[in-house]
Amino acid sequence: MKNLILSLFLITNILSFAKVEIKILEPLRFEYLSTKKLTNEKIAGYGTIEIRAEKSDFGKKITFDFPKSGLMTNRKKWVKVEKYGMEIPEKEIILSQEVEHIKFYALLDKRDIDKGEEAKIIEGEYTGYAPIIISEYSKIGG
């Protein structure tokens, strides 16, 4: 009898777990920097996150948390990233589609890039890592 109750409990719990896949569709990229383009105070890099969910996952809340700052490099020079953010200001969504794309960004200060170095040190494609903490919430019993 105990085994029957335990197996029934396990089957209902396993069926209640659905699958939400989150991946980076486009990595965070800054455009190729040239010393002629350093006219604005801030320079932005953009990327896209893709969320795939099944219909049983609709209504779940996904929240995103970014670090306050980070570093990017072109392999010759390190530059501090001032801020990470998303196109949605509250940094959370409620799943309502099977596939959702969310844009995220990073901001650099122009003065951090050009501190009087030669152009060959400043120019290039800047890359780096931005850890994104993703949390998933659902209603109790749903």
Image (spheres, rainbow, N blue to C red):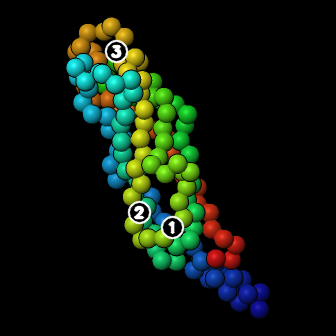
Amino acid type at mark 3: Asp
Residue tagged 1: 95
The residue closer to the viewer here, 2 or 140, is 140
Q: Is residue 73 visible?
A: no
Give the side of residue 15 with respect to residue 4, left or right: left
* Rendered residue at 73%/87% (across/down): 5
Amino acid type at mark 1: Leu
Label 2 crowding class (10 Å Cα cut-off): few <14, some 14-19, many 20+? some
Disc 3 and disc 1: Cα gap in Å? Answer: 42 Å
Query: Tag 2's secondary structure?
Result: strand
Asked if residue 33 is positioned above or below residue 7 in the image, the reply reads above
Q: Looking at the picture, how far across and down is residue 90, in whole percent?
A: 56, 51
Asked if residue 75 is positioned above or below residue 90 in the image, the reply reads above
Give the side of residue 20 with respect to residue 40, left or right: right
Quadrant location, the N terminus: bottom right
Residue tagged 2: 100
Q: Are marks 1 and 2 in contact (CB under 8 Å)?
A: yes
Query: Tag 3's secondary structure?
Result: loop
Disc 2 and disc 3: Cα gap in Å? Answer: 37 Å
The residue closer to the viewer here, 10 or 112, is 112
Residue tagged 3: 114
Q: Looking at the picture, how far across and down is residue 125, in whole percent?
A: 27, 30
